[in-house]
Amino acid sequence: MTLTTILLLLALLVSTQVKSNPRPDAAVFTIDVTEAAGKAPQKSTIRLFNRLYASLDIKPTLIYLPSKRGLTTVNNGELDAEAYRFVSVGQRYANLIRIDEPIGVGNTGFFCVQQNTCGIRKNDKVAMLSGFERAAEICVQFLLSCEYVSSAKGLGKLLDQGLVQGILATTLEGKQIICQANGDKYFFKLEPSLVRYGYHFVHRKHQSLVSALAENLREMRKEGWLNIDKSLAQLTDYGCGKQVEIL
C-alpha cells in the first residue's frame, strides 16, 4: 500500500468521525418561576424574560417548580436563574446573586368575597399558599387564624365556600387564585405594611451578566414593562372574566 493511499484512508477516517460527532447545541439557559404564577408559562412572563435577556443573546426557558424546590435547584446550579423573589428569601441561598434593580413589586393584601370582611381583623380566619414568605410571622403579628394551602385552586375553593374570610396573597398570585375560583366578583384590599420589591436572581456562575441585566431592567421600567408603576386596578385586571374591585 502506497503512502498516498494510507494518507487518503486516514483522511477518510477522520472525516467520518467528525460527521458522527456533531457539535452540541448551545446550552439552554433556564429560569425558575414559582408555581404560584401558574403551572404553565404565561405569555406575558415569557415576553418579559425574553426582553430582559435579549441584549445578551440568550433566549431563556422557563421552568415552573414548587417554591422551595425551585430555589434549591437554582442554588445547586441545576437551573440558571430565579425569576422573582423578595430579598429576604433570596439571601438565604449562598449561590444566588441579586440583580440590584427591582423586577417588580409584591402588592400583598386580602382577596375576599364580601367587602366587609376584607382586611386585617383579630381572629379572622385567613388562608394563604403554604410557601408564602413570612406566613407564620404575619399570622402571629396580626393575630389571625391561618390555614395553609398547597395550591391556588384550593384557596379559591375555600373562598367560594365561605370557609375563610379572605385570602392573603400578592396580586401576582391572585391571578391563579381568582381565575380558578367560581365566583364572578371579588374584592382586594392592599395591606401597605406587607408591600415589598421583588428581584431577579442568577446563579453565581453567571456573575458576568449581573450589570447588563440591571441596566436592562432600568430600561424596561422606563418602557413600561414592569409592574412597579402600575395601579392596583391594572394589576388585578386578570383577563379571565372576573371582576376585582379595589377597596
Image (cartoon, rainbow, N blue to C red):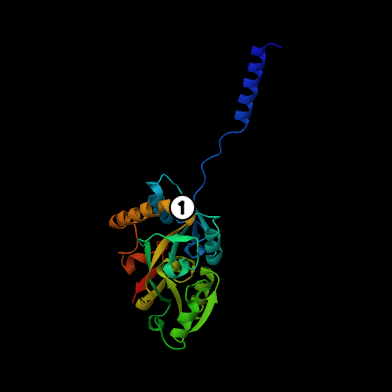
Give how far across and how far down residue 132 sits, in percent: 49, 72
Instruction: Name the secondary structure under disc 1.
Output: helix
Give how far across and how far down residue 65 sits, in percent: 54, 61
**Quadrant position of the C terminus in the picture:** bottom left
Q: What residue type is disc 1 on?
A: His
In this view, which residue lies farthest toward the bottom?
A: 122
Give how far across and how far down residue 168 sits, in percent: 45, 76
Give how far across and how far down residue 117 sits, in percent: 41, 83
| Looking at the image, residue 133 lies above or below residue 139 | above
| Looking at the image, residue 37 lies above or below residue 24 | below
Tell which of 193 and 160 is nearer to you: 193
Residue found at x 38% / y 54%: 213
Tell which of 11 and 51 is nearer to you: 11
In the image, taking residue 220 as reference, residue 185 lies left or right, namely right
How would you rate the neighbour count of disc 1 (Cα within 10 Å): few for under 14, some for 14-19, many for 20 or more?
few
Q: State the count of labels.
A: 1
Q: Is residue 46 visible?
A: no
In this view, which residue lies farthest toward the right?
A: 1
Q: Is residue 116 visible?
A: yes
| Looking at the image, residue 28 lies above or below residue 183 | above
* Residue at which label 1 appears: 206
Residue found at x 50% / y 80%: 136
**Quadrant position of the N terminus in the picture:** top right
In this view, which residue lies farthest toward the top?
A: 2
In this view, which residue lies farthest toward the left?
A: 222
| Looking at the image, residue 23 lies above or below residue 241 | above
